[in-house]
Amino acid sequence: MARKTGSHSEITGPRIRAAALKLFARHGYAAVSMRQIAAEVGVQAGALYLYTPDKETLLFELLKSHMDDLIAAWDAEATGGTPLDRLEAFVRFHIRFNLDRPDAVFLSYMELRNLGDENFAIIEGLRREYENRLERILRAGHEAGAFSTPDTKLATLAIIAMLTGVNTWYREGGRLSRDSVGDIYWDMVRKAVAA
Amino acid sequence: MARKTGSHSEITGPRIRAAALKLFARHGYAAVSMRQIAAEVGVQAGALYLYTPDKETLLFELLKSHMDDLIAAWDAEATGGTPLDRLEAFVRFHIRFNLDRPDAVFLSYMELRNLGDENFAIIEGLRREYENRLERILRAGHEAGAFSTPDTKLATLAIIAMLTGVNTWYREGGRLSRDSVGDIYWDMVRKAVAA
């Protein structure tokens, strides 16, 4: 997509994306106008169109940068070790990364349907790339006899759904620390794939 | 909420709810107008207001009837037996019930934020009632030494998130039958809570 380059847009682009993320997460993509986003940033609506051709492009950029960040963060953190070590690292990483970004996670699930076919396919592709990283761990463990996951694809989707669900109920300062949640979910995942 | 009684509304109410469910699921609650719902039903927009005071009430009725149906269906199906038997029945029931109602499940997750506080609390209460049914099974199994679920509340939320996730990827006529999906998820859940 076309985007202006230079210092001006580099300053304003992140502010526009932050404002859009906040408003989309709070009110829903369909209910938010470009005018409201401009007001949140403190610019005229016309100025917004210097940085983004339309609202869908803003949504797409938010969802894409979330997936890019997720994959890059995992690739930076993923270590070697046994499949069991790698699976534990994945479980704790996924919970932590998502809890740090509640709005972006919420948006990624809620507003995917508002993307056009081409943008949707790109986000779906990035999700698949992320899922493949978990699936490779499960397959390695299954082949080594450490795990029993008769269908590694379904195990992948089941584990990610389970872990992402933490975002729907976790409250900072509640009865459980993030580490305790990580411990409890790791216990369940470890057993779920056990040989 | 006020609702007209009598044969006329009994015929039209379900049609209005079916039209609203279809349009909300397809386009999102915020993007659908009462006028569009009326057009889908084949009545004037004014006629809609004889049956429902506003769009939020329609959404609330859809989410509430989904939860009422879910709980009633499980209560009708839930059998006795060991905690393991009851857990297996729950896993297979949840997947099957949700796959039969993709639009209602989608709406229940996507549009909850559009309810006012009072209606939101009612839906949350019904969810809790449903979750409690699973949690009681887990607690019974844990106390009997058949399961090891150090935190039955989290295990409940994890299992429901995992099972509900099936709706996001399952396609009728794909490589797996519903029964195969039930078998694979039951294997993971059974192991996840194993002592």
Image (spheres, coloured by chain):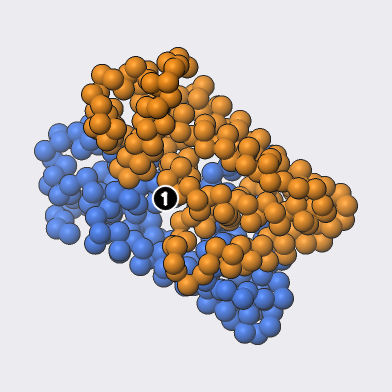
Chain colours: A orange, B blue
Which amino acid type is marked by label 1?
A: Tyr
**Residue A10: quadrant of the picture:** top left
Q: Residue at x 24, y 62 (%)?
A: B118
Disc 1 target residue: B109
Q: Is residue A22 left or right of residue B141?
A: left
- Residue depicted at x 39% and y 51%: B108
Q: Nearer the viewer, residue A69 or A128?
A: A69
B171 over B160 or under it: above or below: above
In the image, is B39 to the left or to the right of A74? Answer: left
Residue A75 locus on image (x, y percent): 69, 40
Locate residue A115, reporting x and y percent. Answer: 44, 28
Report whether residue B13 is seen. no
Residue A45 in sight in this render: yes
Image coordinates for residue A114, horizontal then vertical, percent: 41, 31
Taking depth in this image into account, of A74 and B189 the one nearest to the observer is A74
**B158 left or right, relative to A170:** right
Please, is residue B146 above or below residue A32 in the view? below
